[in-house]
Image (cartoon, rainbow, N blue to C red):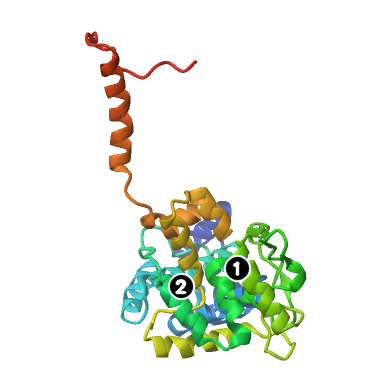
């Protein structure tokens, strides 16, 4: 008995030294109880908190009654495999990341010695399926919308605004003379809030044709925002999304959502020859990496272009001299 007690004491002292000690009173914390605490302290935008609640609901179904210490790597791996019957790979990865985040905070607070989530058991990231409407389909959607809401389609498909940004865009946020949209806020339950990042507030140049359409609608349906209910009042995102769902059924395009209009804009720019940096700026992505991760597959393979460029340099050298010494076909040293 004494030997076992000494061994237990030695283990506890070792855990303290390593910083992985969990007090007995904290070791009984269940995932459900910790999730409640974590969510209460979670700070984010309304939509972000709502998404966290959705994720936690799924996590609680599997781990809710377990203590944090009972959650083992093998259990997490088995859980992610089971999720394949109900969710897409990108959703499974998002749920796994949420679990890892929640348990990381439990480790930080001293309720868990080690996070069972690791790269070794992480599911593949997957790629979110993207439906990209054609320009013809965008105009079909535009025609299917009530006239006073059609500006939302234009702002999504040709300015790249998200639905919460489109319904919150005010008259003063548009320079109708120079043709520039200045996104500054987005819709929220308790009133408009600032956009998440400075990049999201980047000015968006728009063509004269779009400016004229926006101006005509504002004159016909005046209100504090460009998108109104037709009676001078602003609308929430759900009003626009409801019309998208109705049109989606009529058009038989199951994958169509308002956010797909941003994909249309990106595709339009890429097909017209715009480079990565330009598309990044128009989509208001935080980095070019995000743009490449989402749209990189849309750029054409440039193998033949690079071959032609290199071949041209060699051919020009060969043509300039009929007697080219060995080793002469090399790039010139930069000055």
Q: Quadrant of residue 35?
A: bottom right
Q: Position of residue 200 (x, y in %)?
A: 64, 61
Nearest the viewer among 9 and 103 is 103
Sequence-wise, the earlier of marks 1 and 2 is: 2
Please tell me which residue is depicted at 29% across the width and 34% down the height of the picture. Answer: 308
User: Residue 313: horizontal and vertical position, in percent?
Assistant: 32, 25
Quarter location, residue 302: top left
User: Would you call the spot at circle 1 few (<14 residues within 10 Å), some (14-19), or many (20 or more)?
Assistant: some
- Which residue is at the front of the view, 255 or 150? 150
Percent position of residue 121, x then y: 36, 63
Which of the two marks, 1 or 2, is nearer to us in this view? 1
Vertical position of residue 190 compared to residue 110: above or below:
below
Residue drawn at (52%, 63%), measured in percent from left and top?
A: 113
Q: Looking at the picture, does residue 292 appear above or below residue 65?
A: above
Q: CA distance from mark 1 to mark 2?
A: 40 Å
Q: Residue 124 vs residue 201: left or right? A: left
Residue 237: percent from the left, percent from the top? 61, 82
Question: Residue tagged by mark 1?
Answer: 210
Please tell me whether mark 2 sits on a helix, a strand or a loop: helix
Indicate the secondary structure of the residue bearing disc 1.
Answer: helix
Which residue is under mark 2?
Answer: 95
The tag on residue 254 is: none
């Amino acid at each position: 008995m004494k030997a076992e007690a000494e061994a237990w004491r030695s283990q506890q002292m070792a855990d303290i030294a390593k910083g992985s000690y969990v007090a007995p009173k904290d070791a009984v914390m269940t995932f459900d109880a910790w999730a409640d605490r974590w969510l209460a302290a979670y700070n984010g935008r309304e939509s972000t908190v709502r998404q966290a609640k959705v994720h936690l609901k799924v996590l609680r179904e599997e781990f809710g009654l377990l203590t944090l210490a009972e959650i083992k790597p093998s259990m997490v791996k088995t859980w992610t495999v089971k999720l394949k019957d109900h969710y897409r790979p990108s959703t499974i990865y998002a749920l796994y990341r949420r679990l890892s985040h929640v348990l990381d905070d439990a480790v930080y607070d001293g309720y868990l010695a080690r996070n069972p989530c690791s790269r070794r058991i992480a599911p593949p990231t997957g790629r979110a399926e993207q439906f990209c409407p054609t320009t013809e389909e965008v105009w079909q959607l535009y025609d299917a919308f009530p006239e006073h809401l059609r500006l939302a389609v234009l702002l999504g498909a040709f300015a790249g605004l998200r639905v919460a940004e489109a319904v919150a865009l005010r008259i003063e946020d548009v320079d109708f003379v120079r043709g520039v949209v200045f996104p500054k806020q987005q819709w929220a339950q308790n009133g408009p809030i600032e956009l998440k990042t400075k990049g999201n507030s980047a000015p968006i140049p728009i063509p004269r044709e779009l400016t004229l359409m926006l101006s005509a609608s504002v004159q016909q349906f005046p209100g504090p925002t460009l998108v109104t209910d037709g009676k001078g009042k602003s609308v929430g995102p759900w009003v626009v999304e409801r019309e998208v769902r109705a049109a989606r059924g009529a058009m038989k395009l199951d994958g169509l959502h308002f956010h797909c209009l941003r994909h249309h804009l990106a595709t339009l720019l890429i097909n017209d020859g715009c480079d990565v940096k330009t598309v990044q700026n128009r989509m208001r992505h935080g980095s070019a990496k995000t743009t490449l991760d989402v749209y990189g597959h849309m750029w054409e393979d440039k193998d033949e272009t690079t071959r032609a460029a290199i071949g041209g340099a060699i051919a020009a050298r060969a043509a300039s001299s009929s007697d080219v010494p060995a080793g002469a076909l090399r790039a010139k040293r930069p000055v």
